[in-house]
Every structure is written in structure tokens, then in C-alpha cells.
């Protein structure tokens, strides 16, 4: 009888550990809209393995305002967004379901990327006891440079995410739609 109690105790300890190591998964969709161009979508370019950060480059304009829309399913609470050195106010979208936010990002002061180059910008999204850090491979164009619109239409960036026990949000899959 004592052996059975010990085995039951060991079995329960194992179950508690398994429960504790399960991470929380969610999907995060991120959209960029050019506020100064009637909310138009941005574009991206397929680069293959030319650059170390990504196979895709997001094309943006300097001295331009972008609306960044965030949608999480199941809904997640976030408190701040930091992108390319700018701290942005996350505004909950009241007309939408919980987990939807918007922010305005002004690229004033960012210089156009040199020809053939790419610029990695840091995207940091924080919520209660969780943080996502991701480098985005970008190329910035002068406001009048038509090359900023050449490429594939960028509707949204979709990340499948998991929150680790230490609060780090890890991206397990990424796609552009």
C-alpha cells in the first residue's frame, strides 16, 4: 500500500510539471497602413537569402505616418509597442473584440536606406508578464521615390506565437498575406 501511495505521489508531481511547462499559444496579425496615402497598404520584396535577417524586405517611406494594427487570437492584452526607436501608444480598438490595438508610427528622422542595403528595425511588443522582440528587415525610401511601391502587396504579417515560462514570446511560424 505504501508503494502505491508513493507512485501516486510521483505520478501527480509529473503531471504538475507537465502543466507548468505548457506554453500559451496565440496568433498575432500585424498590418501597416500609410495614413498619408488614404490608408493604403505597403509592399514587400522577396530577397531570398541575400540578407541575414529575413528572405523578405518590408518597404516603407521616410517622413511618413503609418497606422499599425494588431489583432491577437485568442485575445491577448498588450500595453506598449516600441518600433525603430519610437515608443508608440497602443490604443485598444473599442469597435473590435478584445485583443485589437492600433498605433501611429511616424518615420520622421529615419534616413532612406542606401541602394542595395537593408535596415533591421526592432519591433518590441509588451504585455503583462510577456515580451515579443523581433527584428524586421526593411528598406526605407524617400517620400517621392516610386520604388517604395514596387513589389508584392503587404496585407498583414501573421505570426504564430507561444509564450514561454519566462514570459518571452517566441514566433513559431511567420507568413505574409
Image: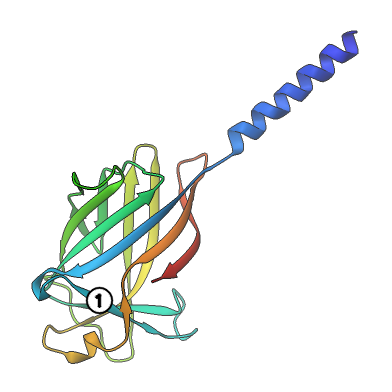
Q: Secondary structure at mark 1?
A: strand
Tell me where residue 164 appears, x and y as whole percent. Answer: 51, 44
Tell me where residue 161 appears, x and y as whole percent. Answer: 47, 53
| Quarter where residue 31 is shown | bottom left
- Regarding residue 92, the answer to whether it shows in the image is no
**The N terminus lies in which quarter of the figure?**
top right
Identify which residue is drawn at 83% across, 15% down. 6
Crowding around mark 1 (Cα neighbors within 10 Å: few <14, some 14 to 19, many 20+) is: many
List the single residue furthest toward the top: 1
| Quarter where residue 120 is shown | bottom left
Compared across the picture, whether 151 is left or right of 111 comes to: right
Identify which residue is drawn at 27% across, 89% down. 150
The answer to whether residue 101 is above or below residue 151 is above
Tell me where residue 61 appears, x and y as whole percent. Answer: 18, 78
Compared across the picture, whether 29 is left or right of 101 comes to: right
Q: How many marks?
A: 1
Give the residue at mark 1. 42
The answer to whether residue 32 is above or below residue 111 is above
Compared across the picture, whether 39 is left or right of 163 comes to: left
* Along the viewing direction, whichever of 111 and 141 lies nearer the viewer: 141
- Regarding residue 139, the answer to whether it shows in the image is yes
**The C terminus lies in which quarter of the figure?**
bottom left
| Quarter where residue 5 is shown | top right
Compared across the picture, whether 96 is left or right of 71 comes to: left
* Along the viewing direction, whichever of 165 and 24 lies nearer the viewer: 24
Identify which residue is drawn at 23% across, 90% down. 147
The answer to whether residue 31 is above or below residue 142 is above
The answer to whether residue 38 is above or below residue 101 is below
Identify which residue is drawn at 23% across, 61% down. 68
Amino acid at each position: 500500500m505504501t508503494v502505491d501511495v508513493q507512485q501516486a505521489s510521483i505520478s501527480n508531481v509529473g503531471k504538475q510539471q507537465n502543466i507548468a511547462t505548457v506554453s500559451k499559444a496565440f496568433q498575432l496579425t500585424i498590418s501597416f497602413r500609410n495614413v498619408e496615402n488614404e490608408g493604403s497598404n505597403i509592399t514587400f520584396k522577396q530577397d531570398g537569402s541575400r540578407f541575414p535577417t529575413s528572405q523578405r524586405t518590408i518597404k516603407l517611406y521616410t517622413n511618413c505616418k503609418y497606422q499599425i494594427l494588431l489583432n491577437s487570437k485568442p485575445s491577448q492584452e498588450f500595453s506598449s509597442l516600441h518600433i525603430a526607436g519610437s515608443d508608440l501608444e497602443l490604443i485598444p480598438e473599442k469597435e473590435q473584440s478584445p485583443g485589437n490595438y492600433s498605433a501611429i508610427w511616424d518615420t520622421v528622422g529615419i534616413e532612406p536606406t542606401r541602394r542595395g542595403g537593408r535596415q533591421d528595425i526592432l519591433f518590441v511588443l509588451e504585455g503583462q508578464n510577456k515580451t515579443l522582440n523581433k527584428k524586421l528587415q526593411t528598406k526605407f525610401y524617400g517620400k517621392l521615390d516610386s520604388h517604395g511601391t514596387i513589389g508584392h502587396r503587404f496585407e498583414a504579417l501573421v505570426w504564430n506565437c507561444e509564450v514561454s515560462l519566462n514570459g518571452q514570446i517566441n514566433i513559431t511560424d511567420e507568413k505574409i498575406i
